[in-house]
Amino acid sequence: MNLYHLKYFVTLAKYEHYTLAAKDLRITQPTLSNAIKSLETELGIQLFEKDGRNVKITRVGNNFLRNVRESLAILDLGITNAEKEGHGEGLIRLNLLRVLSSLVPSLARRFIDQNPEKNISFEFSNAHGLSGEMIKSVQNKKTDLAFCTKIDVNDPSLSFIKVAEENIVLITPKNHPLASKEEVDIFETLAYPQVWFSKRAGMRTIIDKITQDLNIKDSIGIALEVDEDETVAGLVSEGFGIAYIANNKVLNNYPLAILPIKDFNYKRSYYMVYRNDIYHAPVVEDFISFIKEVSFR
């Protein structure tokens, strides 16, 4: 069905006069007449009937008119939205670790403020609470971006842009024997049970590297393994063990001693992750470029 014919039909229904409708459409009257006849033949109904020198829409024509107007309005809205997206407007879908719930919204706000003439919105989610799951969400195109810990997934289609890093520290309950120290030697920690991150967590990769580098893993008593920073901090604050963890703002919500580790240079880095082999809407590409410009150096 010819889209122009539908628009001609709506205009003729408005004027119920071929000459006036043709003038508004900037086409000839025979062109309009032929278009309406073609539409009527295709539909098998009569859309207009003569009314003196004018025409009048038929009952079935009026029923069709309501549907056509609704359809054209939806189409026009779709075209308008697509054009806006083509000019860098629209929605950016991203996942983020809970520990980045201050940093990432701040970056999003800066991006919006730098583009005041554009209608830009974000969909923030941490339903996929672990870095591995967030990366899978990007791989499966369920989200545009993820802000999480880097995990080696051996996938060349993924790009990682560092956005922040934090020192690894020791946390203990306030009344722990190590809590009064200004800093601790990591070998002092081996005498106490520890709360570790599970193997699903990005932080576990860092802890495994630390303990392997220092050859201390077999000397550690692991009391519990859990997924997220908040749970680790909560368990430590209640005396279930001590823990190696990234020194982020989450720790301030718990009654903990936060202790630097002597001669210790390990850090936790956070990255923006995206697919580099697929088409991204211009607004997503613009945000990726923005993150690259302001990213951690």
Image (cartoon, grey):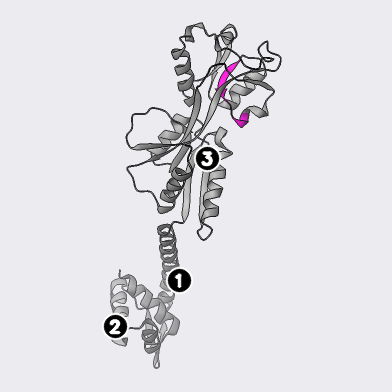
Question: What is the quadrant of residue 257 in the picture?
Answer: top right
Residue at label 1? Answer: 66
Q: Is residue 123 above or below residue 132?
A: below
Residue positioned 58% across, 21% down in the render:
169
Taking depth in this image into account, of 55 and 289 the one nearest to the observer is 289
User: Is residue 245 within the magenta segment?
Assistant: yes
Amino acid type of the residue tagged 1 in the rendering = Arg
Query: In this picture, which residue range is highlighted in magenta?
Result: 242-250
Amino acid type of the residue tagged 3 in the rendering = Ser
Question: What is the quadrant of residue 33 in the picture?
Answer: bottom left
Question: Which of the two discs, 2 and 3, sits closer to the camera?
Answer: 3
Taking depth in this image into account, of 285 and 179 the one nearest to the observer is 179
Q: Please report whichever mark, 2 or 3, sits nearer to the chain's N-terminal start.
A: 2
Judged left or right of residue 208, residue 248 is right
Residue positioned 42% across, 73% down in the render:
65
Residue 214 point in image, percent of width and height: 47, 12
Residue at label 2? Answer: 31
Amino acid type of the residue tagged 2 in the rendering = Thr
Q: CA distance from mark 2 to mark 1?
A: 23 Å
Q: Is residue 171 above or below residue 217?
A: below
What mark, if any, has residue 125 been given in the picture? 3
Of all residues shown, which one is farthest toward the right?
175
Q: Are marks 1 and 3 in contact (CB under 8 Å)?
A: no
Q: CA distance from mark 2 to mark 3?
A: 54 Å
Judged left or right of residue 250, residue 60 is left
Q: Please report whichever mark, 2 or 1, sits nearer to the chain's N-terminal start.
A: 2
Other residues around mark 1 within 10 Å, as few (<14) / some (14–19) / many (≥20): few
Q: CA distance from mark 1 to mark 3?
A: 40 Å
Residue 185 point in image, percent of width and height: 57, 12
Q: Is residue 25 above or below residue 117?
A: below
Q: Is residue 185 above or below residue 32?
A: above
